[in-house]
Image (cartoon, rainbow, N blue to C red):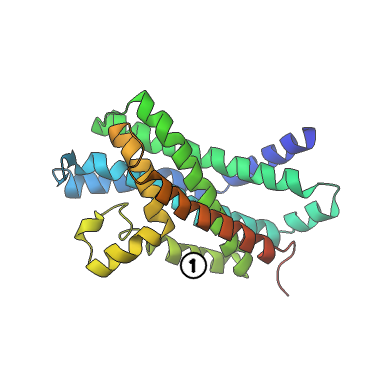
Amino acid sequence: MKQFLKLTKAMFLMHVRNRTTLFWNMVFPIFLLVIYRVAFGDGQVGAVSYMDWVVPGVVVFNILAFGLLGSGTMMVEMREKGVLRRLHASPVAALPLVGSYLLVNVLIALVQCVLVLGFAVVVFGMHLTAAGVLRALPMIIVGIVTFVALGQVVSGVAPSTGMAIAVGQILNFSQMFITDMIMPIDAMPAWIQDAAPYLPAYAVAQLVRPPLLEGTFAPNLGSHLLVTAVYALGAALLAAGLFRWSPKR
């Protein structure tokens, strides 16, 4: 347990000292909300105001960005700086290392979600219920774990930090507008509407939005959880196969 706590503290400090990661995951989502308020503040999505509708989408977009960019890039940086090699040479067991890394990622991503939701409540007057937040919490955690697993696949494929950022950005922004996070899926072409339900960001958005807006679980809870589970398990297995302690030579 002592080893686990030391690793967790070290992982946490490495993340919070990365100013670029902090900006894109703490400040940028707030900036997005302000932009959407100015551009679409008077809009409606069905019976819900656009701002209420988009906040859960920004929460999902933020944890998607954290998993693909923040988490994935951090692992590449640790490899390039020799941190992983030193850990490999030490008596640190693999399980505490993986556990501490995952715990820190989940906690930091949850803090980001709290900031986004808190800003929406205080500045935009969004109404949240305790029951809705409690139902959304496990869905958000499911999303975080799924996206962090996908980020580790990126870290295993990318030979450098720059490449990890490029790949992460492509995967991140390619899903931004077509998976019901920022723009309603009904406004998309038919082929996108058919393909989007098989993308992880769409499934997580459907899991998170109903609890936050209505206080209830998603109608198709099982199917969306199945999609995220397939991505999470597949990405975890692939990331384990791609993992390496040292950079490629």
Please state which of residues 131 and 99 is positioned toward the viewer in this rendering: 131
Picture residue at 50% right of the left edge, 67% below the top: 167
Picture residue at 61% right of the left edge, 57% below the top: 236
> Please, which residue is most extreme toward the top here?
130
Please state which of residues 5 and 28 is positioned toward the viewer in this rendering: 5
Q: Which residue is mark 1?
A: 166
- 31 lies above or below 125: below
Residue 84 lies left or right of residue 172; in this view the side is right
Q: Amino acid at mark 1?
A: Ala
Residue 37 lies left or right of residue 230; in this view the side is left
Tell me where residue 194 appears, x and y as whole percent: 30, 65
Q: Quadrant of residue 7?
A: top right
- 1 lies above or below 101: above
Badge 1 local density, few (<14 within 10 Å), some, or many (20+)? some
Residue 84 lies left or right of residue 161; in this view the side is right
Res. 134 visible in picture? yes
Tag 1's secondary structure? helix
Tell me where residue 157 appears, x and y as whole percent: 60, 69
- 1 lies above or below 81: above
> Please, which residue is most extreme toward the bottom here?
249
Quadrant, the N terminus: top right
Q: Quadrant of residue 140?
A: top left
Picture residue at 74% right of the left edge, 46% below the top: 95
Picture residue at 23% right of the left edge, 41% below the top: 51
How many labels sit on residues? 1
Res. 22 visible in picture? no
Tell me where residue 205 appears, x and y as whole percent: 36, 48
Tell me where residue 130 appears, x and y as whole percent: 37, 24
Quadrant, the C terminus: bottom right
Please state which of residues 126 and 135 is positioned toward the viewer in this rendering: 135
